[in-house]
Amino acid sequence: MNTVTSKDGTPIAFERHGEGTPLILVDGASSYRAFNPLGPQLGDLLGASHTVYAYDRRGRGDSGDTAPYSVEREIDDLAALIAEAGGTAHVCGFSSGAVLALDAAAAGLPITRLALYEPPFVVDDSRPAVPDDYLERLDALLAEGRRGEALELFFTTPCGFPAELVAGMKAAPIWAALETIAPTLAYDGRFMAGTMTGRPLPRDRWSSVSVPTLVMYGGATESWIVSAARAVSDLLPQAGLRDLPDQTHDVSAEVLAPALAAFLADGERA
């Protein structure tokens, strides 16, 4: 494990796998290195041509945190990692981490190629929209220290998990670890606000993103996620869309790696 210091002094923990062109992975809500094996797995599969960076977003795992939260501070974290990697990097974001990666590209970070896996926008009526008071309710639970209830709200509302599934999760050992990072659910809630309403995406938020982009979704994923992937790929001027066969929101490194390798190699040969 290594650390880099973000602009506000927050230490951000990361690990490197492989040797080659930098590829930084951005996790979504409720995920960090201890939970997500994609870093080392993609390092094994892509390590001959890429250095894969997996990091703990602020407030998670071995990274620090500094109040007050802002998405700009998270973008600064990614900027510090890109500087550590040599000044430019490819970036691949997963779920809400894909939205953070999009915001970072719009902010002008030196991202050479951008890959997005299943950004969780709700752009039509194929599933219930997230209620307007979701973030307010989440903030209230966290302010009262009710982290378990905040997790339940997250998993049943924006994630749309059945209550029975969440009850099973609560009985698993992982639940206590999830409670430690529950406050960061509000971080993702802030930059996801307004994108899970069942209405079309704002056309101006990412209009400056001109970097070549690959938007991916799983062939076995839910229909609303497919709609989201199509919607964001339609918005971006240099975006392609790819279906990864038999995959769900929990993508396999063995399926993801060849798609990333082909996309990234196109830019490196140019």
Image (cartoon, grey):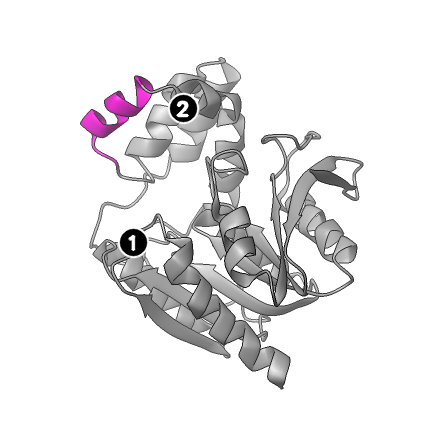
* Residue 213 seen in the figure: no
Element under label 1? Answer: loop
Horizontally, residue 74 falls left or right of residue 149, namely: right
Task: Report the residue marked by disc 1.
Answer: 198
Q: Residue at x 67, y 33 (%)?
A: 63
Position of 91 relative to 265 (above/below): above
| Residue depicted at x 59% and y 30% | 61
Q: Is residue 7 left or right of residue 199?
A: right
For residue 21, above or below residue 196:
below
* Residue 142 on image: x %, y %: 49, 20
**Magenta segment includes 169:** yes
From the viewer's side, name the closer residue of 131 and 78. 78
Q: Is residue 262 magenta?
A: no
Reply above or below: 173 against 268.
above
- Which part of the image, by quadrant, shows the N terminus? top right
| Mark 2 Cα-neighbour bin, 10 Å: few <14, some 14–19, many ≥20 | few
Q: Is residue 42 left or right of residue 49?
A: left
Location of residue 241 in the rendering, given as x and y in whole percent from the top left corner: 38, 73
Q: In which image quadrant can residue 257 be found?
A: bottom left
Q: The magenta stretch spans which residues?
A: 161-171
